[in-house]
């Protein structure tokens, strides 16, 4: 028995070394709450992929599951903490970052990770979002941006591109969209990355770097909503959706190169694309460190 | 983890044993003595002084103060802190209390111990920020949507404000629930001599003694109170899923099942209402031969005491009943008193809130001595309704 276990472990280690990943079955066994299945996500939805990438990133850094708290607000992506076998707080709409602030300050040893959506994060939760970034609190925010309010049936979001359709923008959206990553950077987050889910490795690497960063990390993942967004905007099936992403995103380095060197008429088309990649990574004292220093200074 | 609960350190931070302080400071002192080590604040008149005192003293004893971006955030941070293991609180007034209602509901649904001091002012809306009122005594029980049972205490002097703040923390931990300390601008900003107690009796959170697999975070308590489950603090390996959705005993969403919702909410309500008599704290004066009784609470009871004395001097057979527990509403006491007297006069700083609860349970005539505008009643104004 002991021999078999040892062998299995060695086999796992070997495969991990070879592929850099453990397989889905092993991930499921180690990380998921069995009692929560089946999950709620639609066919073709990207949120399950986000979960898989997150678990692989956690596996890479060998995260201590007993010392980790996942939080979320309300919406499709906010259901994710329920599936992971860790302490988790599924809170009210938009407020997860404020709850997370209380958790992290109270016990700085806990790893604190938040799943949020575009509406949850920058719509109803916008104020908490900018202030968490300003404080550079040591938490990791994984924001699933699907350009729409999915759980409630496809209403227009602060991220919905201008002209796109939603149930509450039946004649086309007249508002310009928010860029969450730009907001995170300017508000003070120290690690910011954005990827679409057609990239298999880069988002996972960014989540890993975010988890390791000692400060506010913001990872925006562009994720297809096949039910509420694709249907109303006639994107097509999931393969077409993924091509659609390729067409609408550009690596940050390329984007900046084009900005400088492409002719005006070409740039006019390019500039509407979303920059993807690691957009910011800097070292700065976190809120917890600053608070602890102050306590050392004034304690009796 | 956050600074350990050390009473001597708290007393050292507080300073002199006798102090001439206002109600807001008394709340802060009571909290520190009870073991509060986290305060999520947001400025609001007339409660800001509580946050200011906590911001000054908490870091000195290893506790944490954070000023959040709004009241939605301050109450949220307190709930997060409580799950991470701290005795935690916030303080606010009417407009902030209105903003906090959603997460107060979350605290009830997730059975999160916390204390909220509400230094009441008038409303609706911004109203009279610097003047006292008792405008939130119904909101505290009915402000958040759905069914829940609030615990709300109402002191009438500064020493009692300190003492009931300690009691609020103890009840929050004992019942795994948010507890509201309801004072008003008058008490918050009024100064009296206060004695810092030498010994403080505290109730510590009941943590599970079973394995994570056996732990039931939202069902029956294994020890202590049957309807109050133990609290598995985050980071201790219990891997609890806490949600505002209707959930089963393990914490998993069970939103479509009538029975699951009924079981959960009834238990949450009954863990408090079953102990209504134990939770009831009442001050009674001159009730033996009383034919009429003035019922009041908080700052208003000081005017009611004046009315009692003046009325008795005039030969009126008056009695006095003060509610230190507003919620769960002491309906059994109202019923008992109303069977002895001919008339009840409810005095409060609003246009009638607790009056409606008294009228619901009283067998006799009930009159209302209401007052709004930021001044307390004169004894004469109460006697006019006698």
Image (cartoon, rainbow, N blue to C red):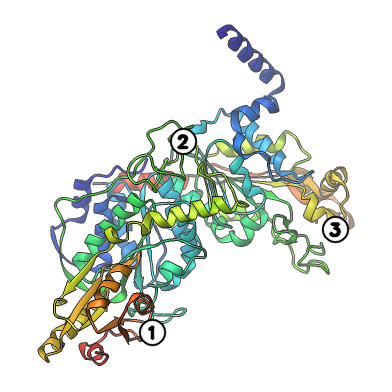
Q: Report in which chain the residue with disc 1 lies.
A: B
How many other residues sit within 10 Å of disc 1, few (<14), some (14-19) or many (≥20)? some
Q: Nearer the viewer, mark 3 or mark 2?
A: 2
Gap in Å between the C-alphas at discs 2 and 1? 48 Å
Disc 3 is placed on an element classified as: helix
Sequence-wise first label, 2 or 1: 2
Q: Report in which chain the residue with disc 2 lies.
A: B
- x%, y% of residue A118? 67, 55
In the figure, is residue A50 to the left or right of B162?
right
Gap in Å between the C-alphas at discs 3 and 2? 54 Å
Name the residue located 34 percent from the left edge and 40 percent from the top edge.
Answer: B223
B363 in relation to B56, above or below? below
Can you identify the residue that label 2 sits on? Answer: B238
Q: Report in which chain the residue with disc 3 lies.
A: A
Kindly check if marks 1 and 3 are in contact, taking CB atoms under 8 A apart as contact.
Answer: no
A209 in relation to A255, above or below? above
- x%, y% of residue B375? 29, 85
Kindly check if marks 2 and 1 are in contact, taking CB atoms under 8 A apart as contact.
Answer: no
- x%, y% of residue A267? 84, 55
In the figure, is residue B110 to the left or right of B204?
right
Kindly check if marks 3 and 2 are in contact, taking CB atoms under 8 A apart as contact.
Answer: no
Can you identify the residue that label 1 sits on? Answer: B351
Can you identify the residue that label 3 sits on? Answer: A268
Q: Nearer the viewer, mark 1 or mark 3?
A: 1
Q: Quadrant of residue B333?
A: bottom left
In the figure, is residue B95 to the left or right of B254?
left
- Number of marks in the image? 3
């Amino acid at each position: 028995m002991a021999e078999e276990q040892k062998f299995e472990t060695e086999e796992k280690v070997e495969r991990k070394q070879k592929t850099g990943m453990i397989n889905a079955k092993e991930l499921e066994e180690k990380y998921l709450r069995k009692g929560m299945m089946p999950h709620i996500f639609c066919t073709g939805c990207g949120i399950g992929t986000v979960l898989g990438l997150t678990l692989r990133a956690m596996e890479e850094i060998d995260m201590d599951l007993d010392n980790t708290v996942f939080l979320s607000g309300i919406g499709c992506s906010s259901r994710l903490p329920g599936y992971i076998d860790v302490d988790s707080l599924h809170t009210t709409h938009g407020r997860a970052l404020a709850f997370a602030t209380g958790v992290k300050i109270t016990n700085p040893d806990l790893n604190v990770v938040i799943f949020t959506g575009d509406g949850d994060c920058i719509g109803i939760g916008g104020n908490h979002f900018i202030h968490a970034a300003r404080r550079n609190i040591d938490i990791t925010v994984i924001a699933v941006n699907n350009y729409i309010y999915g759980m409630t049936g496809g209403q227009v979001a602060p991220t919905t591109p201008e002209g796109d359709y939603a149930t509450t923008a039946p004649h086309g959206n007249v508002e310009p969209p928010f860029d969450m990553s730009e907001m995170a950077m300017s508000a003070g987050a120290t690690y910011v990355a954005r990827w679409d889910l057609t990239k298999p490795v880069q988002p996972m690497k960014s989540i890993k770097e975010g988890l390791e960063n000692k400060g506010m990390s913001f990872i925006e993942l562009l994720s297809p909503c096949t039910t509420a967004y694709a249907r109303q905007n006639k994107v097509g099936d999931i393969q077409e959706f993924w091509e659609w992403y390729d067409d609408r995103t550009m690596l940050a380095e390329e984007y900046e190169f084009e900005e400088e060197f492409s002719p005006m008429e070409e740039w006019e088309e390019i500039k509407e694309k979303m920059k993807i990649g690691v957009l910011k990574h800097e070292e700065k004292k976190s809120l917890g460190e600053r608070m602890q220093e102050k306590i050392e200074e004034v304690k009796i | 983890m956050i600074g350990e609960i050390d009473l001597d350190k708290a007393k050292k931070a507080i300073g002199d044993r006798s102090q001439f302080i206002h109600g807001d400071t008394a709340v802060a002192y009571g909290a520190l003595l009870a073991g509060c080590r986290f305060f999520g604040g947001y400025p609001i008149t007339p409660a800001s002084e509580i946050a200011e005192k906590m911001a000054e003293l908490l870091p000195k004893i290893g506790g944490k103060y954070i000023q959040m971006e709004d009241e939605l955030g301050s109450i949220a941070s307190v709930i997060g802190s409580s799950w991470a293991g701290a005795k935690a609180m916030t303080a606010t007034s009417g407009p902030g209390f209105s903003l906090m209602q959603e997460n107060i509901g979350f605290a009830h649904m997730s059975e999160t111990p916390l204390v909220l001091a509400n230094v009441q002012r008038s409303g609706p809306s911004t109203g009279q920020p610097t003047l006292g009122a008792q405008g939130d005594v119904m909101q505290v029980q009915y402000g958040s949507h759905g069914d829940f049972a609030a615990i709300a205490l109402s002191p009438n002097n500064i020493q009692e404000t300190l003492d009931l703040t300690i009691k609020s923390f103890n009840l929050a931990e004992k019942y795994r629930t948010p507890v509201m300390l309801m004072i008003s601008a008058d008490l918050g900003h009024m100064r009296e001599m206060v004695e810092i107690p030498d010994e403080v009796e505290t109730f510590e959170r009941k943590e599970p003694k079973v394995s994570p697999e056996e732990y039931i975070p939202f069902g029956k308590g294994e020890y202590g109170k049957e309807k109050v489950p133990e609290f598995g603090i985050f980071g201790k390996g219990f891997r609890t899923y806490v949600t505002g959705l209707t959930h089963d005993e393990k914490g998993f969403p069970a939103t479509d099942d009538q029975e699951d919702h009924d079981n959960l909410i009834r238990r949450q309500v009954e863990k408090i209402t079953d102990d209504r008599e134990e939770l009831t704290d009442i001050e009674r004066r001159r009730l033996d031969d009383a034919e009429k009784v003035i019922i009041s609470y908080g700052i208003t009871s000081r005017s009611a005491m004046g009315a009692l004395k003046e009325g008795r001097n005039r030969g009126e057979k008056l009695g006095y009943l003060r509610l230190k527990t507003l919620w769960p509403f002491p309906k059994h006491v109202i019923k008992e008193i109303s069977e002895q007297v001919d008339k009840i006069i409810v005095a409060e700083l609003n246009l009638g809130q607790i009056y409606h609860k008294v009228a619901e349970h009283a067998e006799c005539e009930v009159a209302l001595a209401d007052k709004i505008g930021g001044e307390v009643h004169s004894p004469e104004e109460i006697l006019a309704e006698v």
